[in-house]
Image (cartoon, rainbow, N blue to C red):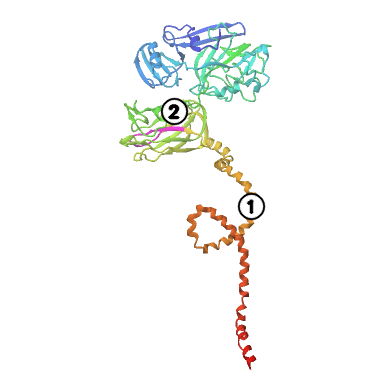
Amino acid sequence: MNWGEDVDLILNKVPVPTTTTTTTTTTTITTATATTTTTATTSGKGSCPAGYYLGSGDIPGWGQIRGKIETSLAGCGEECSNTKECCSFEFSVTSGLCNLNRDCQPSKIPYKDYYFCIQNKEGTKWQKVYSHDTAGGLFATVDEAKKKNINDEDADLFSVLYNLKSMRNEDGVFHLKLCYPELTEHAYPCNEWIQSSNPVLESTITGYIGIKETWPKNSGGNAFQGLGLSPPSFSSNLIDDAPSSTSWWNSIGTLKYHGGSDTIPGPVGPTGIIVKKKVLYVEYKPPSCGHVKVTGDNYDGSFMVENLITVQNKELFVDNKANYWLSPNARTATFILNLGCSETFDSIRLVNVHNREHKDRATKQFRLYTSQTNSGPWTQVLDTQLEDSRQQQDPLPIQIIAIDTKTTTQFVKFELVSWWGRGGGLMFFNIVDEVQQVQPVTDVQPVQPVLPALPVLPVQPLQPVKPVLPVEPVQPVQPVLPVLAVEPVLPVQPVQPFLPVKPVLPVEPVLPVKPVQPVLPVLPAQPAPLLQPVQPVLEVPQPLFLRS
């Protein structure tokens, strides 16, 4: 049997009693000196409908979406399948009542005889993350136990546990299955469960929800509660079912043999069982970052919380549907964003509301929390207040609010604490990593000074004019141009309208005639007029004296 096949198919092979019972079977394992007791609790008749698998637990109340629907088990599954937000349903054979839930996983222990059926996510599959066959020996170190033969999952020693942190499901938890292929006397030789803690990184096991427990005990003799990281001082393995105990059954990343020359610790019935093979799977869907889902409290079906993940320019109400979110009247409310995978942010962007022409409500104080799962634990990262937007004009502004510390998370919870007017609401909400957005710009900025120069590039055709630069020796003639500065005396400047007749400018070669100007200094040499008094002397007496 392929223990990696879908759990709902396997569950259908397990006989289910026709009434609410607890079935206990005792089986002697021939491969180990131990007796194991398998306890499984099932309720009602049959199993979950196709497309769903059986969980164990309850979500308090009469459904997060709708409840007390009178129908059959199959009809309850159809109701959930036809409801967009529905991820799980609860059904009681006794009462014939059906409850629909947004959350996929239960948060409490089972209630009466109610089934808890969880919808199989499209695209999910069982992914092998670890296998150990002692025919290939032991893992040499805990580091090798995290990463070994990563491209050959059929190898005797195989592990991609180093990457388990990226394999949380859409609810932000790990859906795990630890199987023992040798123990074929069991119809389902696996323990299957959900936990929120990462067994590769955390010793404290949290968020455990059992789904199918063939072996219900752990190393300490207590109820099986999942897997956790062994302390650094423990040198026998990487992970087991009781990190604080000296026993180490359900061992993962085994570094030592136990109970024989080629055997290692397996599951626990009343006592431990030694095995030679084990395989760990995780139900996994590749993350869809950027595909944000949101669930929360609504005023009614017209003002849904899903509206706030889309940027809008103006509040609208068309065909009895609004494009913004309103909380219930005069009370606190919450919504949760599922980011699809872990993302880092240091700010949020939001647009408040004022409820169109009514202008009667807006968000005032709110708190923001983060978590790796949709059920917590939650860490508060922001507590702030918005100004009254009821009288603001459209379009309402986008506000950017920084948080104190950069945070990495998959789930963000918004809690409305107080409001302006009749209640709260938002038109838009999203997270953003402002620093991350600026950093690429910072890297490009050294290039950006060149970018402004690009407009100058068209001017570069002028560079061919640079051959004129050799004519720059003519520039010494430019000192003559200061003489042109004297030309302001020329009232001829009005003739400048004839500048288009710039061919007149060649007349400037007359400027070389200006050397004639040195002749002008010769004019002062005309003292010749002083000879004129001498001329009268020549004319007067000479003939008169001859006559005498």
Q: For mark 1, does the 10 Å Cα neighbourhood hold few (<14), some (14 to 19), or many (20 or more) residues?
A: few
Q: Residue furthest front?
A: 547
Residue highlighted by disc 2: 336
Q: For label 2, count other residues whose C-alpha is less than 10 Å away and answer few (under 14), some (14-19) or many (20+).
A: many
Residue 538: image location, x then y, percent: 63, 85
Count of marks placed on residues: 2
Main SS, magenta region, reads strand
Residue 336: image x %, image y %? 44, 28
Quarter where residue 110 is shown:
top left
Q: Which residues, given as a range, are shown in magenta?
A: 416-430
Residue 259 in sight in this render: no
Q: Is residue 222 above or below residue 421?
A: above
Q: Amino acid at mark 2?
A: Ile
Q: Position of residue 257 (x, y in %)?
A: 67, 15
453 or 9, which is in the foreground?
453
Secondary structure state at the residue bearing disc 1: helix
Q: Can you say whether 524 is above or below 538 in the image? A: above
Task: Give the amino acid at mark 1.
Answer: Glu
Q: Is residue 427 magenta?
A: yes
Question: Which label belongs to residue 472?
Answer: 1
